[in-house]
Every structure is written in structure tokens, then in C-alpha cells.
Amino acid sequence: MEAMAKARYVRVTPQKARRVVDLVRGRRTPDALAVLAFAPQAASEPVRKVVESAIANARVKADEVGEAFDERELVIASAFVDEGPTMKRFRPRAQGRAARINKRTSHITVVVAPAPARARAAASSTGRTS
């Protein structure tokens, strides 16, 4: 069962957020959270919060249906960053000029889903978690 979480109007540029999202796309959720916890980029914190929210949404959906829930079986099925509105600010420059500063925002979306059965069987038979 898929679950989705979104964070809108996050004050980080989409280009920088996409670098972080690319690190975790397709990974299992515990591995993704570990990567995000130690990633040096500033965008890793809002992305980590969205991943945790998607996991919590999956838990709520599983409880509603009455299914067993195991966070370790979830995989980040898709994750993407869209551009939000840009705030335009002006900074004074030499000789009375003004330069425009663009303060960009992002919309971060993460979808988690259970790992395919084939991948779960391969991971459990080798004793590996990834």
C-alpha cells in the first residue's frame, strides 16, 4: 500500500533539494533515513522530515485496513522536487543600481511503498538489508 507525503513552500532551492532526493530514491526507508541523517547538505533535514511523514502515513493506512506494518519493508518508490514560487528581493549595488535576488522555494514529494516480494526474498535469504 502506497503512502505519500508532501512539503510545500520549503525555503531551499529545487536544484539543491534534488541533489539530496537523488541520494535516497529507490532505497529502503531505514537506509534512506540513515543517509539523510548524516548528509551534510542543508536540504537533507526537510527531505528527512518528508520521508518520516510518508512512513507515518503508511502506518496509518495499514492500521485503517488492518494490515501488518513493518517499516523496514518500505521502499522510497518515487521522490521528486518541484519548483515553488520565487520571492523576489532587491539588494543595493554601486552607483544607485539595484540587483534582484531570487529566493526560491521547493515542493518536496515522497511516495513510499512495500518492497516487491522478489526483492524481499533476496534480501532475507542473503541476510543483507539492502
Image (spheres, rainbow, N blue to C red):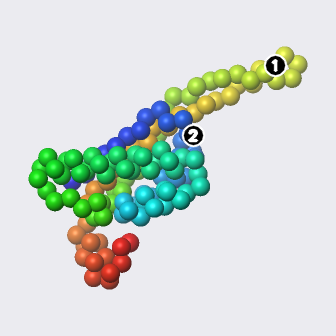
Q: Amino acid at mark 2?
A: Thr
Whether residue 118 is visible to the viewer of this picture, yes or no, is: yes
How crowded is the residue under tag 2: few (<14 C-alpha within 10 Å), some, or many (20+)? many
Disc 1 element: loop
Residue 81's tag is none
Query: In the orientation shown, which residue stands out farthest toward the top?
Result: 96
Whether residue 18 is visible to the viewer of this picture, yes or no, is: no
Percent coordinates x, y for residue 115 in the rendering: 28, 64
Question: Which residue in the protein does label 1 denote?
Answer: 97
6 lies left or right of 20: left
Percent coordinates x, y for residue 59 in the rendering: 23, 51
Quadrant assignment for the C terminus? bottom left
67 lies left or right of 38: left
Q: Quadrant of residue 12?
A: top right
Disc 2 element: loop
Instruction: Tell me if residue 30 comes above or below residue 79 in the rendering.
Output: below
Which residue is located at x 45 percent, y 38 percent?
A: 107
Which residue is located at x 12 percent, y 50 percent?
A: 65
How crowded is the residue under tag 1: few (<14 C-alpha within 10 Å), some, or many (20+)? few
Disc with the residue nearer the chain's start (1 vs 2): 2
69 lies left or right of 33: left
Query: In the orientation shown, which residue stands out farthest toward the right?
Result: 95
Percent coordinates x, y for residue 81 in the rendering: 46, 44
Which residue is located at x 37 percent, y 50 percent?
A: 52
27 lies left or right of 58: right
Question: Which residue in the protein does label 2 denote?
Answer: 13
C-alpha distance separating marks 1 and 2: 26 Å
Q: Amino acid at mark 1?
A: Arg
Which residue is located at x 49 percent, y 36 percent?
A: 10
Instruction: Tell me if residue 107 comes above or below residue 45 in the rendering.
Output: above
Q: Quadrant of residue 86?
A: top right
